[in-house]
């Protein structure tokens, strides 16, 4: 458990980076600090491992004031991941990961053996263990950075905008990897970002900071989206916060409909009318893209399937949330969302209007439950 009590950081020139911060972070939780540049989120995080010293107030770790703990000893027990990984360029991947265990007294041989296990855990091929950081992609370097932070099995992991320097596809992959790892390891993670989408995806709790180091709201991500505590939070999370909020709603009741599919070999025999669409699939049933009557004409003219099919839109996997269900439908050129199973094969189509109807039903059920709870409480008070 990490506790901030009336913590302020003011620099000699009078700048206040963190303003009277009170915050309680539960053990085993994934907490995200989010806000614009200069809002004190990184300063707040770096005070946990004493890389920055507060001007006033106290920070306790499991009830112990960290100002009384030797900073080197404190940091050896806290994992730290920064932007662009911060790997030692003259050391191999395996030796980078083994750094902290060796500093703690583990033999180099044992530390390297444990490092290989951690590399596998973060999804890196062991053939990369002997490479040097310059020989890795940005995403691979970040995975090594996470592995190095986990190598000594610390109970706390600090992550300072670790995925901001990689491209969107790699970033999403790394986010998914962090969710998987946290599901397995249950570390106490404090993660800094300026991206509200990243914050609500990863965090059990989200702390929204404004400039001047003021904590505006600390809440579950769905509460941040549904009930912003201040005008600043409302503006920061954006006008499309309702769409983001769909990621916390289940899609189990959304109907799947049969859709027309064809393999590439079947395309020359297709007969489509105006406005009709067919989903092109592989022999294994995985989607390749949509094609309409103009695509058929293009294929007959000798163009390849890759040239004539429209982008397939995003895909929806059974069990995912309403946001992904709706996105699959509205991003599809045909207006039909494509649902796939765990192997990527098509299982049916999703209608956007039915996703909206499911949202309306969920809200109606929530209103009913809220009203029943209110009147039950009123009756109990009267008795």
Image (cartoon, rainbow, N blue to C red):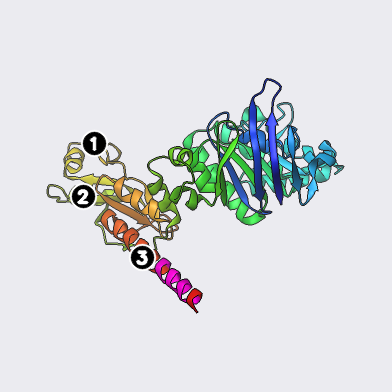
Question: Residue drawn at (44%, 41%), measured in percent from left and top?
Answer: 234
Mark 3 Cα shell of 10 Å, populated few (<14), some (14-19), many (≥20): few
Closer mark to the observer between disc 1 and disc 2? 2
- Marks 1 & 3, CB-CB < 8 Å contact: no
Mark 2 Cα shell of 10 Å, populated few (<14), some (14-19), many (≥20): many
Using the image as rendered, state which of residue 30 and residue 278 is in the foreground: 30
| Residue 230, x across and y down, in percent | 48, 42
Q: Which residues are magenta?
A: 370-380
Residue 20 lies left or right of residue 374; in this view the side is right
Quickly name the residue at label 1: 303
Cα–Cα gap, marks 3 and 2: 25 Å
Q: Main secondary structure of the magenta part?
A: helix
**The image quarter in which residue 52 lies:** top right
Closer mark to the observer between disc 1 and disc 3? 3
Q: Which label is found at residue 277?
A: 2
Q: Which label is found at residue 253?
A: 3
Q: Give the SS element for disc 3.
A: loop
Closer mark to the observer between disc 3 and disc 2? 3
| Residue 133, x across and y down, in percent | 66, 30
Dot 1 or dot 2, earlier in sequence: 2
Question: In the image as oriented, which residue stretches furthest toward the left?
Answer: 273
| Residue 375, x across and y down, in percent | 42, 72
């Amino acid at each position: 458990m990490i506790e901030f009590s009336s913590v302020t950081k003011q620099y000699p020139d009078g700048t206040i980076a963190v303003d009277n911060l009170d915050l309680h972070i539960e053990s085993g939780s994934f907490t995200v600090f989010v806000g614009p540049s200069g809002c004190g989120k990184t300063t707040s995080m770096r005070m946990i491992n004493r890389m920055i010293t507060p001007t006033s107030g106290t920070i306790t770790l499991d009830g112990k004031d960290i100002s009384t703990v030797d900073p080197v000893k404190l940091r050896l027990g806290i994992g730290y991941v920064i932007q662009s990984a911060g790997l030692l360029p003259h050391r191999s991947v395996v030796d980078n990961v083994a750094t902290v265990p060796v500093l703690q007294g583990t033999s180099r041989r044992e530390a390297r053996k444990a490092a290989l296990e951690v590399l596998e855990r973060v999804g890196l091929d062991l053939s990369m263990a002997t490479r040097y950081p310059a020989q890795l992609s940005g995403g691979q370097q970040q995975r090594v950075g996470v592995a190095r932070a986990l190598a000594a099995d610390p109970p706390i992991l600090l992550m300072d905008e670790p995925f901001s320097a990689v491209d969107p596809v790699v970033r999403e992959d790394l986010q998914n990897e962090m969710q998987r790892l946290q599901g397995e390891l249950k570390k106490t993670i404090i993660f800094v970002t300026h991206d509200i989408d990243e914050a609500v995806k990863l965090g059990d709790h989200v702390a929204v900071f404004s400039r001047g180091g003021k904590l505006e709201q600390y809440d579950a991500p769905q509460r941040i989206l549904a009930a912003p505590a201040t005008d600043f939070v409302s503006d920061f999370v954006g006008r499309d916060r309702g769409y983001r909020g769909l990621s916390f709603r289940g899609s189990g009741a959304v109907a799947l409909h049969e859709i027309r599919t064809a393999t590439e070999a079947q395309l020359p025999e297709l007969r489509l009318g105006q406005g009709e669409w067919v989903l092109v699939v592989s022999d294994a049933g995985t989607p390749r893209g949509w094609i309409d009557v103009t695509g058929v004409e293009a294929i007959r003219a000798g163009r390849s399937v890759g040239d004539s099919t429209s982008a397939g839109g995003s895909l929806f996997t059974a069990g995912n949330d309403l946001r992904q269900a709706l996105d699959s439908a509205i991003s599809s050129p045909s207006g039909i969302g494509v649902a796939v199973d765990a192997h990527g094969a098509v299982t049916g189509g999703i209608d956007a209007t039915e996703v909206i109807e499911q949202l309306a039903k969920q809200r109606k059920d929530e209103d009913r439950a809220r009203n029943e709870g209110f009147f039950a409480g009123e009756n109990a008070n009267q008795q």
